[in-house]
């Protein structure tokens, strides 16, 4: 999927489903990543028979993809346009969320490390003072007091 | 040092009392341990300020003043090193809450999709939870650990990052309306 505005590409691995964001390269044009990875509203929407194109809409019924015959002509074109519009809207949202997540990835990671470190130090200080944790609560005030008075 | 320290805490967690003297020794005699986690907190703070204000230096200044005010309100001036770390964490989580809050408001104003709103709402809930946990941690430290004991233990007041004392600045009045600024492409 090519995000023209930001000149980036979203690539989804068909094997692992992992999504990566990369700068746009013309090589990516040929890769129909999103549609090949999804069963709904997919790549076989238009089918050609005797030189005439017919539109099939793929929907999910009880979790299974079902092809619904739409036909040809203006009605089919309209349905196809609506499906494309929905798909574009979904992809736009997906890109927005990816961008937002990317923007705070480093900050999130550092905050997580800092949180973990502070927790570790807090726990070390409490345990060194003789406290122990039971069901999420720190206990052992009497023992801690005796350790303090001893030291 | 960090690996050994983590191992000692792990042992203490599993009830091994024999490691407690060494744990105390590490806490007493290794100021770099406190410095390491203090610096980590400072790095995280800078990263969050950048995420919150982008390259706007005026906003950056105001956010920093607000953070200094939060720290001062929580008594960072006469806090033990451990308390300071926890206070830093509270300030950091305050920023995370406001970042998510602003982003959620912007998503609502810009009529973004439901998925986008859900994404920011989830982040907001998570940030609020972390904020409350960090406040709880400060309460635990103040209730259970006497200040003098920790100050003696760490002995590393100078090792911790210096905190600007701007308590007198009415930062809340100076704060202009914030907005999330995207990374420059």
Image: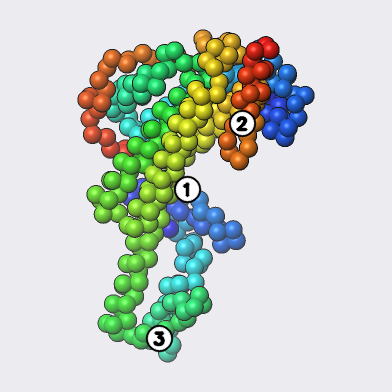
Q: Is residue A147 above or below residue B44?
A: above
Residue B180 can be seen, yes or no: yes
Q: Residue furthest right?
A: B18
For the N terminus of chain B, give its image quadrant: top right
Mark toward the start of the polypeptide (1 vs 3): 1
Task: Residue at 36%, 21% (x, y): give it.
Answer: B73
Numbered badge on residue A69: 3
> Where residue B120 sits in the image (x, y, percent)?
37, 48
The mark lying in front, picked from 1 and 3, is: 3
Q: Is residue B56 above or below residue A53?
A: above
Mark 1 → mark 2, Cα distance in angstroms = 51 Å
Task: Residue at 44%, 44% (x, y): give it.
Answer: B126
Q: Identify the residue position indicated by label 2 in the image.
A: A139
- With A148 as the anchor, is B99 left or right in this view? left
Q: Is residue B64 above or below residue A56?
A: above
Q: Are marks 3 and 2 in contact (CB under 8 Å)?
A: no
Numbered badge on residue A22: 1
- With A106 as the anchor, is B150 left or right in this view? right
Residue in front for this viewpoint, A32 or B140: B140
- Label 2 is found on which chain of the structure? A
Q: Picture quarter containing residue A140?
A: top right
Colour option used: rainbow
> Where residue B61 sits in the image (x, y, percent)?
30, 22
The mark lying in front, picked from 1 and 2, is: 2
Residue B38 can be seen, yes or no: no
Mark 3 → mark 2, Cα distance in angstroms = 68 Å
């Amino acid at each position: 999927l090519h995000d023209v505005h930001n000149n980036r590409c979203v690539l989804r691995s068909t094997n692992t489903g992992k999504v990566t964001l990369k700068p746009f390269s013309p090589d990516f044009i040929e890769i129909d990543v999103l549609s090949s990875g999804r069963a709904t509203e997919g790549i076989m929407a238009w089918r050609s028979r005797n030189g005439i194109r017919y539109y099939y809409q793929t929907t999910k019924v009880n979790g299974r993809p079902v092809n619904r015959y739409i036909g040809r002509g203006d009605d089919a074109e309209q349905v196809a346009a609506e499906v494309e519009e929905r798909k574009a809207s979904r992809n736009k949202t997906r890109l927005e969320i990816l961008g937002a997540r990317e923007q705070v990835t480093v900050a999130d990671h550092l905050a997580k490390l800092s949180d973990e470190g502070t927790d570790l130090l807090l726990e070390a200080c409490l345990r060194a003072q003789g406290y122990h944790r039971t069901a999420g609560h720190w206990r052992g005030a009497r023992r801690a007091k005796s350790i303090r008075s001893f030291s | 040092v960090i690996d050994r320290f983590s191992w000692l805490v792990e042992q203490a967690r599993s009830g091994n009392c024999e490691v407690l003297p060494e744990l105390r020794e590490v806490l007493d005699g290794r100021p770099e341990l406190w410095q390491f986690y203090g610096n980590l907190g400072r790095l995280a703070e800078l990263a969050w300020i950048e995420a919150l204000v982008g390259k706007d230096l005026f906003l950056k200044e105001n956010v920093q003043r607000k953070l200094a005010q939060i720290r001062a309100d929580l008594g960072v001036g006469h806090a033990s090193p451990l308390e300071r770390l926890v206070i830093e964490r509270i300030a950091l989580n305050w920023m995370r809450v406001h970042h998510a809050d602003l982003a959620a408001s912007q998503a609502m104003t810009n009529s973004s999709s439901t998925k986008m709103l859900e994404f920011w709402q989830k982040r907001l809930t998570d940030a609020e939870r972390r904020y409350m946990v960090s406040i709880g941690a400060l309460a635990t430290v103040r209730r259970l650990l006497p200040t003098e004991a920790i100050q003696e233990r760490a002995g590393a007041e100078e090792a911790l990052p210096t905190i600007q004392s701007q308590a007198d600045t009415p930062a809340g009045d100076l704060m202009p309306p914030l907005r999330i600024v995207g990374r420059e492409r």
